[in-house]
Image (spheres, rainbow, N blue to C red):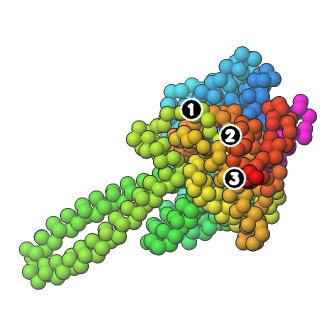
């Protein structure tokens, strides 16, 4: 089934991280909690002794891998500064988890092995076994079966020696899940049947739910849909009781696959629509996207091409709203499937022609009738082929445009030609951050789709403004918008261009508030800093053009310390724009972890004084 691998990998990650790491290292995803902690961290209103714990809790509760990497870097820098081995270990672990989620397996292994060195040096046996389990999961993704068996065996042996019953059962569950990936459901069930009773004895409902779900996947692979449906339904019931809705949406989609394989289309559509409704209710973006894609597949299989295309457009539009390059890969898959289908159609046509020739020898009249039918069929096939080709070409063009929207033109060209992009250092770049005030308060009371639509309204305008001034968009993180001037090609007046763009962004936001153009509007803070950065592309499947360096961190601080409706710039930027813009000196401001920084508000273009 198409969703099989996705379901299994997700279940493995949740078992490994949410259960094993939760008990030992304090892990448990809660994005709203993470956002609250980020606000606390950025405000600086906390005891400095709690800084590492706050950063660690932020990283532990964020579901988005890009945001995990951002704050994990901050955690690592502060942990190294304070010489905290405990939090250096946690930073390596969470960095590995985020890289594995993004598909960067080699990077994940590198981070995990660094964590292993710390655990081994400190003789932390349980932490060492947890890392062995995480490493085994990465090797499973690489299909390195020898290493998978070895690392799971080592982890299980340590958990048995340490009498850690829960983690022992989780390791057994994950090993069984790996056998499921290898299409060996019988072996998988042997391990699931050992771990399940342990979860039940420990009264760990969450682990038991995943065990039932994994058994359901194994039964489905054995060709036993009834047993699969029973187990998955029981898993969903437990998860509903626990209020854990993320996995429920995935299992509902998997139930849709089971019914689709039985050609029970009413049941298949019912489960997919339930998954979509639940995902929308709880704002689960990835699951909303998956549900749209599943409904598109179901309509395609039942012959409703227009409905399939409609839901696929929703899928693409939703993914585009969070700047996700997976759409490019999906379009490539569609082209490949279409080409295979076209070749199969040509083979079928040739066979039909042979059969027609045999019939001609029996009776001329029947042959003429069949030729007429064949001619009509060929005409319809030609029309269909022409339309299909046009759709493919449009999707290919959209794919190319999407890639260019995500990466700079030259960077996208280098990526297509060489399969990778070399990192480059720029000596002078001006970085701009924006952030909407009270965004979190809005998000708690606004429909998720409406919230995404409003963000798209503002960010689309920002995109037009920075393009007008020759700047490069880097990324958006929640309600934050980041761009830079002076790359991918160095320009002499990048600081002036970036300040002009900031003034235009501020003007646009104020005009929206004044005209009340939307159902609700925001106030914006803007911060700028100038200095050297390193730029490059990260990710192997979901590409992202990003920049790094102290310049970026200071620019973020400039935004944090700005006021509503104001543009706050650093001393470096001020020196480059003071002759063009009228600036108000704010004095020296103490910034957490950055020391004393000079800051200035930009008031507007400098008015030339006339000489009398």
The part of the image, by quadrant, that contains residue 427 is top right
Disc 3/disc 1 C-alpha distance (Å): 24 Å
Q: Residue at x 85, y 43 (%)?
A: 586
2 vs 1, front mark = 2
3 vs 1, front mark = 3
Residue that label 2 marks: 576
Residue that label 3 marks: 502
Q: Residue at x 24, y 61 (%)?
A: 347
Report the side of 260 relative to 123 (left or right).
left
Residue that label 1 marks: 425
Of pointers 2 and 1, the one earlier in the residue sequence: 1
The part of the image, by quadrant, that contains residue 590 is top right
**In the rendered picture of this protein, how many numbered marks are placed on residues?**
3
Q: Is residue 161 above or below residue 574?
A: above
Q: Residue at x 44, y 41 (%)?
A: 414
Residue 470 rendering spot, x and y as whole percentages: 56, 50
Residue 475 rendering spot, x and y as whole percentages: 62, 48
């Amino acid at each position: 089934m198409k969703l099989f691998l996705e379901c299994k990998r997700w279940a493995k990650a949740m078992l490994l991280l949410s259960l094993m790491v939760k008990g030992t290292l304090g892990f448990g995803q809660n994005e709203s909690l993470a956002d609250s902690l980020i606000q606390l961290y950025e405000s600086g209103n906390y005891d400095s002794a709690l800084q590492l714990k706050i950063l660690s809790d932020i990283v532990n509760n964020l579901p988005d891998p890009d945001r995990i990497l951002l704050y994990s870097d901050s955690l690592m820098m502060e942990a190294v500064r304070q010489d905290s081995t405990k939090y250096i270990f946690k930073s390596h672990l969470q960095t590995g988890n985020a890289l594995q989620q993004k598909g960067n397996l080699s990077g994940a292994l590198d981070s995990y092995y660094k964590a292993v060195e710390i655990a081994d040096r400190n003789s932390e046996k349980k932490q060492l076994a947890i890392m062995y389990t995480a490493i085994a999961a990465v090797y499973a993704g690489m299909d390195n079966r020898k290493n998978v068996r070895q690392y799971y065996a080592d982890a299980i042996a340590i958990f048995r020696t340490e009498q850690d019953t829960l983690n022992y059962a989780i390791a057994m569950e994950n090993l069984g899940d790996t056998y499921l990936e290898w299409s060996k459901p019988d072996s998988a069930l042997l391990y699931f049947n050992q771990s399940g009773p342990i979860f039940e004895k420990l009264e760990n409902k969450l682990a038991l739910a995943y065990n039932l779900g994994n058994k359901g996947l194994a039964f489905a692979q054995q060709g036993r849909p009834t047993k699969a449906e029973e187990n998955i339904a029981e898993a969903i019931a437990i998860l509903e009781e626990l209020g854990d809705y993320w996995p429920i949406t995935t299992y509902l989609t998997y139930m849709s696959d089971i019914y689709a394989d039985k050609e029970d289309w009413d049941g298949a559509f019912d489960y997919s629509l339930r998954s979509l409704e639940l995902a929308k209710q709880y704002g689960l973006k990835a699951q909303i996207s998956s549900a749209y894609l599943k409904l598109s597949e179901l309509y395609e299989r039942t012959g409703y091409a227009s409905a399939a295309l409609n839901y696929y457009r929703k899928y693409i539009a939703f993914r585009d709203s969070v700047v996700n390059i997976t759409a490019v890969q999906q379009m490539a898959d569609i082209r490949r499937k279409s080409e295979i289908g076209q070749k199969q159609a040509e083979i079928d046509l040739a066979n039909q022609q042979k059969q027609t020739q045999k019939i001609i020898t029996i009776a001329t009249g029947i042959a003429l009738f069949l030729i007429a039918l064949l001619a009509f069929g060929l005409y319809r096939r030609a029309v269909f082929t022409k339309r299909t080709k046009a759709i493919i070409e449009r999707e290919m063009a959209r794919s190319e445009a999407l890639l260019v929207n995500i990466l700079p033109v030259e960077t996208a060209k280098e990526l297509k030609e060489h399969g990778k992009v070399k990192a480059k250092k720029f000596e002078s770049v001006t970085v701009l951050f924006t952030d909407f005030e009270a965004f979190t308060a809005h998000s708690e009371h606004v429909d998720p789709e409406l919230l995404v639509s409003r963000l798209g309204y503002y960010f689309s305008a920002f995109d037009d403004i920075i393009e007008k001034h020759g700047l490069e968009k880097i990324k958006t993180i929640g309600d934050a918008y980041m761009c830079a001037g002076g790359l991918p090609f160095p320009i002499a007046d990048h600081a002036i261009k970036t300040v002009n763009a900031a003034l235009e962004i501020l003007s646009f936001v104020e005009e929206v508030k004044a005209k009340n153009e939307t159902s609700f509007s925001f106030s914006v803070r803007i911060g700028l800093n100038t200095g050297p950065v390193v730029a490059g592309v990260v990710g192997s499947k979901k590409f992202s053009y990003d920049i790094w360096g102290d310049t970026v961190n200071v620019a973020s601080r400039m935004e944090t310390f700005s006021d509503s409706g104001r543009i706050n710039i650093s001393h470096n930027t001020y020196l480059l724009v003071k002759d063009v813009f009228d600036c108000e000196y704010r004095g020296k401001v103490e910034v957490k972890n950055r020391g004393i920084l000079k800051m200035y508000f930009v008031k507007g273009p400098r008015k030339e004084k006339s000489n009398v």
